[in-house]
Image (cartoon, coloured by chain):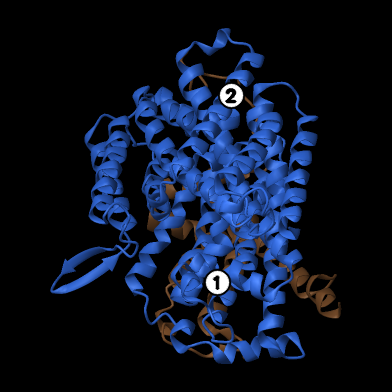
Amino acid sequence: MTQLTIIAIYLGLLLALGLFSSRMFRGTSKDYLLASHSIGPFLLLMSLFGTTMTAFALVGSTGEAYKEGIGVYGLLASSSGIIHSLCFFVIGIRLWRFGRRHGYVTQIQFFRNRLDSESIGLLLFPVLVSLVIPYLLIGVMSAGTVINKVSVGALPGMFPEQQGAVPPWLASLVICGVVLSYVFFGGMRGTVWANAFQTIVFMVLGVVTFYVIARELGGQTSFLDNLREIGRQIPHEKLTRSEMGKLKFFTYCLVPLSVGMFPHLFQHWLTAKSAESFKLPIVAHPILIMIVWVPCVLVGVWATSGLIKIPPPIDAHPNAVLPFLVGKLASPVLGGLLAAGILAAIMSSLDSQFLCLGTMFTNDIVLHYARSKTMSDRTKIAIARAFIVVIVAVTYGLSLLEPRSVFTMGVWCFSGFASLFPLVFAAIYWRRLTTAGAFASVLTVITTWCYLFYRSGYGEDRGYTFDLQLFGDTYSMMPVAPIFAASVVALVLVSLLTRPPSETTLAKFFD
Amino acid sequence: MRIVAHLIGHGGLLYQAKQYLDLANILFPRPATSFPIRVIRVICGEHIVSFYEKSDFTFIGFVMRIIVWVLIAVLLIAHQDNFLWRNDTMVWGFMPIGLAYHAGISIAASVAWFLATQFCWPAENTENAKPMPRSSGGNRP
């Protein structure tokens, strides 16, 4: 009951923050969707970091480290530290500048203008939406599961069939309701404020959890002695990357490039007050990743030390390792706080994605085809809000079908976005990019992605790699590598073979 | 505190470094007249030099820009630490060396990006982009 109470208080605080931020709403669509380009460095840092870090940063990193060892940090975190900041620097600032200059709200508006093509929007829209939806589903379903697991025995009279736990359908409904409330009323400003609050919550709780687990697991007098004692017990294979392929590790570096094509990050970039606001996120992002990931990875490998027995059901589901350790080693209060932290990580991504999809449907479909110039700002906000409600409702409805296979799609969604990175990079820096080249690139990504996804048993084979046979040797790499390479080749070749864009179009984007 | 004062205080290391940078800028005042730029003109051609002149950077800025991007490329290469693949040494008795190394990469990335924001920050980013009359805004004209 303690844990459930803490979660309820946390959700209440979040609602209050979202509703308070709505008092600053200026009544324009630009304010609702982009916070009137008023977000300064700190809030931009927190919202970008909170949006890119999902629950995976806490429970997934611990679970993967438990399974694979310390190599997980290099595979997923340190590469992201370099490449996310690279994307903010070379893509984010430029797109922010174009957005301010031409009044963009969505990525598709930028691509339609840059490529002088109506149809590129029709091609990109379903691709981007299809890649975001599995991600949303993972968030909604995970939130329901987290609350269900931590509330066992809390309400025995109400839910006897769930051992007194809040059923996942109800927990997911509450989470969707809370996120919808602050996104609906607060728009982008509410989302940014809630993101900043939630990012601070999950970072602080991650570090506190690390300290408590080290103290309880080590059983020594000082904190450093605890760390050393646990360190001595970790098996050799978890301290090295002996079971990890070097080429797979290398090609995984392409995955963080997905940040350059996330539609929800595009929208966050546009909220910046000035280009100077990007400096803090660019510099601090790698450090924040380190602060969250290093403790979680250490806790994951500590769980293999034998100092605590991991029961078979937890061993089979590594994502349950962190909640299990907290349940065993920490007080119910910390357990409740950690659950709130995990929910914070989930919701700080969900809100941006809900708002982004609502914005895309409003701007790229309704306003684009309905001659928006005759529409008042009030109507535009009403349409955006209506779409946000519909998207939350549809996502929640889909989550009730419990499509568990969606959990296997995480890395595939990232691979899809990463393979579209050459398109956005070329659109910004390469004058010779043509509409046909862009089409060729997107169609190549769709084709190769679908083919490799099929080859992986629709994501069932989690360890699937693309195996290249060369001179009798087999080179195993992440599927993103061939998709990315094919995307680049198609983009460059077709662009060079087709007529260059007009000078009028280029003049809008190149000095 | 003394160490910090020694680094950034008046007469400290960073202060002195800046004096040297200023001196270098005086020695190479404008790209077009400086010796290194004449060399670049001969080697790379007029196109590169005119691009450089338009950019309004000092010579030191130009060199630092190259250094920072090389540093980031080095970080990406250093990320592939094959030499530590099977090393199970514990740093300070509790931190696996593979993890400590990559935590170091994260810190180095932060430093490299700090340098990038100092030396590679495009001049156009120093002032706010003025919102221009909305051309088509991506919507149908």
Left or right: B85 as drawn, with respect to A389: left
Which residue is at the front of the view, A164 or A354? A164
List x then y, in percent, for residue B110.
62, 64
Q: Which chain, by letter, is brown?
A: B
- Picture quarter containing residue B111? bottom right
Residue that label 1 marks: B105
Badge 1 vs badge 2, beta-carbon distance below 8 Å: no
Res. A346 in view: yes
Q: Residues within 10 Å of mark 1 (few under 14, many from 20)?
A: many
Q: Residues within 10 Å of mark 2 (few under 14, many from 20)?
A: many
Q: Which chain, by letter, is blue?
A: A
Q: How many marks?
A: 2
Q: What label sits on residue A326 in the rendered view?
A: none
Secondary structure of residue under mark 2: helix
Of badges 1 and 2, the one in the foreground is 2
Chain ID of residue with mark 1: B
Q: What label sits on residue A384 in the rendered view?
A: 2
Residue at (34% x, 24% y) in the render: A119
Check the image and report above or below for A135 versus A108: below
Res. B30 in view: no
Which residue is at the front of the view, A167 or B50? A167
List x then y, in percent, for residue A320.
54, 66
Which residue sits furthest top? A374
Left or right: A205 as drawn, with respect to B74: right
List x then y, in percent, for residue B77.
43, 70
* Distance (Cα) linking label 1 and label 2: 42 Å
Check the image and report above or below for A314 versus A55: below
**What's under tag 2, amino acid-wise?**
Ala
**What's under tag 1, amino acid-wise?**
Ile
Which residue is at the front of the view, B26 or B17? B17
